[in-house]
Image: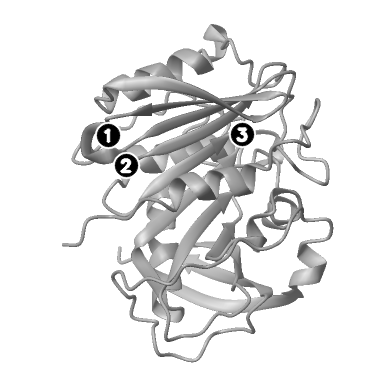
Amino acid sequence: MPRRMLVRPILVLALAALAVGVPGAAVPHDPDRGLRSTGCGQAPPQEPGQARRYALVDGDRERSYLLHLPEGYTPGRAWPVLLAYHGRGGSAEGMAGYSGVAALPAVVVLPDGVEGDEGRQAWQGAPYSDPGVDDVAFTHALLDTVESRTCVDRTRVYAAGMSNGGGFAEVLACAAPGRITAVAAVAAAFYPHGLECDTSRPVPVVSFHGTDDATIPYVGDPGRGLPDIAAWNADRAAAHGCRAGPEAERPGPDATALEWSGCDRGAGVRHVVVEGGGHTWPGAPASSGPGRTTATVEAYRELWRFVSRYRLPLP
């Protein structure tokens, strides 16, 4: 049966309402030409600096997402895209409020998951997500829509997520490396997802994890199929063919960043270990999960410095 898709606006939210307490100032925008989307040259669907909720009907299911346009957005300039996925039981508004991603120089898209076990919103790949939902296909439909309505650079599409959302960002790296440029995973739940990965292109990844995370333990949880986080990153570096590293640096007094280089097609791997950190988003000004939240590292800035170096090869 053909998939039908309908998009309509639901609600306009001012940036100030979404970003109360968002840390730091906006990251400066560096214009580039890239591969421009079909939305370039069209009137923007909303005012820059605002977030608006839209419904997207795909097949027989209605989904929704927040679309945030950066300050200074114009339809003549192709902007990067950041897809931001909340954790289990979370929401797009909650993710926007604690993550700080609305301050980034990008078109930011914050979708909502579908209710799975216990009536909590979740993303594909986790054992508690709705098994009938294909969030990879939804992401493709969402990007098709955003690219048709806004002016974006199709070579710079990044995915980030928290917890279950971070695990789903990695699912996208596996299933859609031709469309997702790089991913960022915060306190990620890397459950075995059972998908056959497209190995045509290694996808750069940056991850953040607290050593005292009691929800997704840093040392893993074999009974739940969760890997040791340090081993997961080393395995990813090996899969990317990285020849050097990890080199260590200290982005904060309670954080160590490990980075592998010399990787296949430059697809680097970076891992930020937050010592004593809980199941939280580093630098969050509001509650993002249980445990200690570091104030010395801002994940939104750190992840952007990493992912924004990368672009997809032009066809």
Residue 171 point in image, percent of width and height:
41, 38
Q: Quadrant of the C terminus?
A: bottom left
Badge 1 or badge 2: first in the primary sequence = 2
**Label at residue 75:** none
Mark 1 vs 2: CB contact within 8 A? yes
Q: Gap in Å between the C-alphas at discs 1 and 3?
A: 21 Å
What crowding class fits label 2: few (fewer than 14 Cα within 10 Å), some (14-19), or many (20 or more)?
A: some
For label 2, the SS is helix
Q: Where is mark 2, residue-wise?
A: 175
Residue 254 point in image, percent of width and height:
72, 24
| Amino acid type indicated by mark 3 | Ser
For label 3, the SS is loop
Q: Gap in Å between the C-alphas at discs 2 and 3?
A: 19 Å
Q: Work out whether residue 88 or residue 189 is closer to the camera in this orientation and state it.
A: 189
Residue 35 point in image, percent of width and height:
28, 70
Q: Residue at x 46, y 78 (%)?
A: 150
Badge 1 or badge 3: first in the primary sequence = 3
For label 1, the SS is loop
Mark 2 vs 3: CB contact within 8 A? no
Marks counted in the figure total 3
Q: Where is mark 1, residue-wise?
A: 197
Q: Is residue 52 above or below residue 258?
A: below
Q: Residue at x 58, y 10 (%)?
A: 219
What crowding class fits label 3: few (fewer than 14 Cα within 10 Å), some (14-19), or many (20 or more)?
A: many
| Amino acid type indicated by mark 2 | Ala
Q: Where is mark 3, residue-wise?
A: 163
Q: Work out whether residue 224 or residue 79 is closer to the camera in this orientation and state it.
A: 79
